[in-house]
Amino acid sequence: MKSVNFHSCLEVNNKIWFLSVEGYLMNLDCTTFESKIVFPFNMQQWYFKQVINDMIALNNKIYFVEQEGSRIYEYDIQSNYCNFYSISNVMPVNGACFSGIHLYCDEIYLFSRLSDTVFCFHTINKTFRSIVGNLKIITTHSIRVENKVYLYGEKIVCFDMVRNQFLYDCNPGEDYIFWMQEFQNQLYILTKNKISIWDEMSNESKIVYDMNGDIGELGIFFITRNKIFLLLNLIKDILVIDRQSGTISNDVPPADLFYIEKGWSKYWGYTQNEKYIWVANRSSNQIICIDKKTETIKWNKLKNPKEREKIPYINLIENMLLDEKEFSIEEYILFCGKKFEIDNDNKIFGKKIWDMIR
C-alpha cells in the first residue's frame, strides 16, 4: 500500500475506523497512527468501492451503506463478523444514493439524495420501514442538530426525527450549499464564495467570510471557539479565519505532503470527539487533526499496514498483488504450508502451494 486513503471515518475508543479505497475495513490508532487491516470487503461477495460520508457506531457495532445504496452493513467489532441487509426500492444514483445516515433511538435513518423518501432500519429487529414526504428535493449532505436533520444541496430541507416528518424546505440564497456546520446553536453554511450564518427562523444569512471568487469553490470547514478552519480543494494551504477580527492566516502543510489528483474534492468525511476533529484523507498521504482546545492543526502521516497482513486473505480475493519487498517468498510459502496442514490434506501439499503462488 503506497498510501491508505478513505472517504469516510468514525472514531470509536481512540481508534478511527474506515473503509480504505482498496476495500479493507481498517482502523487507525489515534496515538501512534498505525493502521491495521480488520476485514476484507474487497472479496467478491462483499465488494463495493466506497461508503457514503457517514458511519454509525452502536452497541459495539459499526453500520455503513455501500455507494449503490442497496445494502446496509453491520460489522461486529468484538466478533469480527459482518452481516448485511438489503434495502428495497432505492432510487439508483450515479454516486452515493444517500445524503447521510443518522441514528435515532434504535433506528438508522437513511436519507435519499434525489427524493423525499427516508428508509429506517431497526437495528434490533433488522427490519425496514419508509417515510415519504411531499417535497421535490436534491441534496448531497446532511447534518444532525439534536433531533433535527438538515439536508442540503440545492436547498435546505429540515426533517424532525421525533415527529418522523419533513418540516420545510427553503433556499437561503441563489447559491448551491456545499457544506453546513453547527456551532453554539448557530448554523453556518458554505456557498460558492462565502461562509454565512443562516438564521432558520427568518431564512436570512449573514456573511462571515467572503472569498471574492479568488480561490475557487467547494470545500469544507470546521469551527472552534475562536477560529474557522477552511479546507478548500484548489489550494494545499488551509485558511484559518479569526472569528473576532476576521483576519486570515495560512496553515502551511508539511513539505512531504502530497495529493493524488483524481478530479474530486480532497476532503469529504470526518469524525470527531470532545477533543479532536479528524478529516478523512481522501486523496493525500496524511490525515488532518484539528485540536479543539489549542485550535491548531496537526498533520499526521499514516503508518501503513504491513503487506504480510494481506496474506490471510490471498485465497479469498481475486487478483491480489503482494509486494515482496516487505517479506520473502519463503515466508509466504511457510504461511501456505501452515494453512494447508489445517486442511489435513498433505498428499497434494506441493500442488496446492504451486497453484496458489503461480
Image (tube, rainbow, N blue to C red):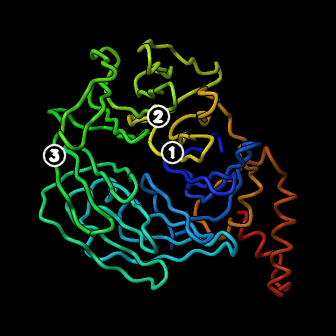
Can residue 200 be seen here? The reply is yes
Residue denoted by label 2: 222
Residue in view at x 38 percent, y 34 percent: 263
Q: What element carries label 2?
A: strand
Q: State the residue at coordinates (61%, 35%).
A: 289
Q: Which amino acid does label 1 sit on?
A: Tyr
Mark on residue 170?
Answer: 3
Rendering quarter of residue 155: top left
Disc 2/disc 3 C-alpha distance (Å): 23 Å
> Which mark is drawn over residue 134?
none
Among numbered discs 1 and 3, the one appearing first in the sequence: 3
Q: Which of marks 2 and 3 is nearer the N terminus?
A: 3
Q: How crowded is mark 1: few (under 14 residues within 10 Å), some or many (20 or more)?
A: many
Image spot of residue 199 (x, y percent): 25, 38
Looking at the picture, tell me which residue is in the foreground, 259 or 202: 202
Residue at the disc numbered 1:
270
Residue 348, image quadrant? bottom right
Image location of residue 338, percent across then percent down: 86, 73
Q: Which amino acid does label 3 sit on?
A: Cys
Classify residue 281 as left or right of residue 186. right
Above-or-below relation of 248 to 41: above
Q: Where is residue 264 in the image (x, y as percent from the top left)?
A: 39, 37
